[in-house]
Image: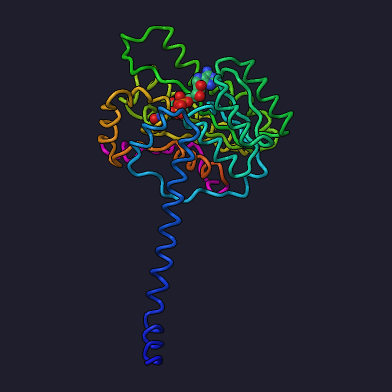
Amino acid sequence: MIAQLMKFHELFFPVWQSLLFASVRHKRENNFEYSSVRDTIKGTDSEHSRSRASTLKHPTRRAIMKFEEFKRQTVFITGAASGIGYAQATLFLENGANVALFDQQELGLKKLKELFPSQVVYTVGSVKNQRDVQLAVEKTQTEFKRIDILCNTAGVLDGFKTTLETDEVLWDHIFDTNVKGTYFVTKAVLPSMVEKQQGIIINMASIAGLISGGGGVAYTASKHAIVGFTKQLSYDYIKQGIRVNAIAPGAIQTPMNAADFKGDGEMAKWVAKETPAGRWADPKEVAQLTLFIASATASYMHGNIIQLDGGWMNKG
Ligand SMILES: NC(=O)c1ccc[n+]([C@@H]2O[C@H](COP(=O)([O-])OP(=O)(O)OC[C@H]3O[C@@H](n4cnc5c(N)ncnc54)[C@H](O)[C@@H]3O)[C@@H](O)[C@H]2O)c1
């Protein structure tokens, strides 16, 4: 009888084993998924977080990226107090990088400084102001002695205004922030990268930088300008060891889009329905792409505009 039981056990051992491992793996993935979304939620304001929790039907299931190489590097991120910039900063910090945060709002910057005190310096200022930018870059050089990676993430939306609805003040605000701001920050960081013959720059474009309908006229024109800026910057400095790319996100659930989630959230639901993936993305998903592009794994990527849009551009 015992011999028969042993034989049965031996025969089915591989099956028990794979079932056991599958169950452990499933549990781990689900735990990760829960904590991943909850952690991201902690980083944003509570009203926005509630709408995020209820609309992310397919939260990120991927494992968090781990890169040893960032432990020795310094990243400068604009727009780091909120949304995508906050997520990028958090993921670089979790991977051991020193991060210089720049934004016109202090709250999110302060929070990251409290969470990662020895890895963070921050400056409150505007990318529209060349002096603010220069001071922030100097502060970073003094504190961390280097800037290896620049993420030009700060940006503003234009309320989806058409040409006749757009006045000069709005036009200048959008272009001064999205385009001139990116140029100011790049110009301040680039000399030290050129001196070292090494550096990574990741600009924040948008699907609005490739097609119409993702913003109003000023936003769409400004993001098309970021696409052009990225390509020319890459072309001009590729021989000097600088690797430049841009990310073109689709619908990412951040405070920038809070209006879409107001009330019954009809607009947010429509956007999710129109997106082939059927959902908005979490800013953490943009952060994961950012780390990949910034890593040596992406060493042959130059002057690319990388879409992260749940299939939006693929619809035709
Ligand atoms: N959320 C999306 O769906 C989406 C899609 C495509 C592209 N983008 C782009 O991603 C970037 C980040 O957007 P987000 O969704 O995280 O928005 P967000 O509003 O959550 O964050 C933008 C951050 O930029 C900062 N900022 C704005 N003007 C600034 C200035 N003059 N100086 C310094 N900081 C300034 C804001 O204070 C804020 O912290 C933007 O460039 C945006 O155009 C967003």
- Where is the C terminus found, in terms of image quarters? top left
The location of residue 80, given as percent across then percent down, is 54, 28
The location of residue 260, given as percent across then percent down, is 32, 25
Res 282 → quadrant: top left
Camera-side residue of 38 and 73: 38
Instruction: Looking at this view, name the residue that lies furthest to the top.
Output: 168
Camera-side residue of 199 and 294: 294
Camera-side residue of 279 and 12: 12
Can residue 226 be seen here? The reply is no
Camera-side residue of 276 and 108: 108
Instruction: Looking at this view, name the residue that lies furthest to the front.
Output: 1
Name the image colouring.
Answer: rainbow
266 sits to left or right of 175:
left
The location of residue 97, given as percent across then percent down, is 63, 40
Residue sitting at 65 percent across and 23 percent down?
136
The location of residue 276, given as percent across then percent down, is 28, 40
Res 184 → quadrant: top right
Magenta stretch encompasses residue 314: yes
In the displayed structure, would residue 315 be above or below residue 140?
below
Say how many tags the image has: 0
Residue sitting at 62 percent across and 39 percent down?
241
Residue sitting at 57 percent across and 17 percent down?
126
Boundaries of the magenta span: 296-316
- Where is the N terminus found, in terms of image quarters? bottom left
Res 132 → quadrant: top right
Magenta stretch encompasses residue 311: yes
Can residue 39 be seen here? The reply is yes
314 sits to left or right of 147:
left
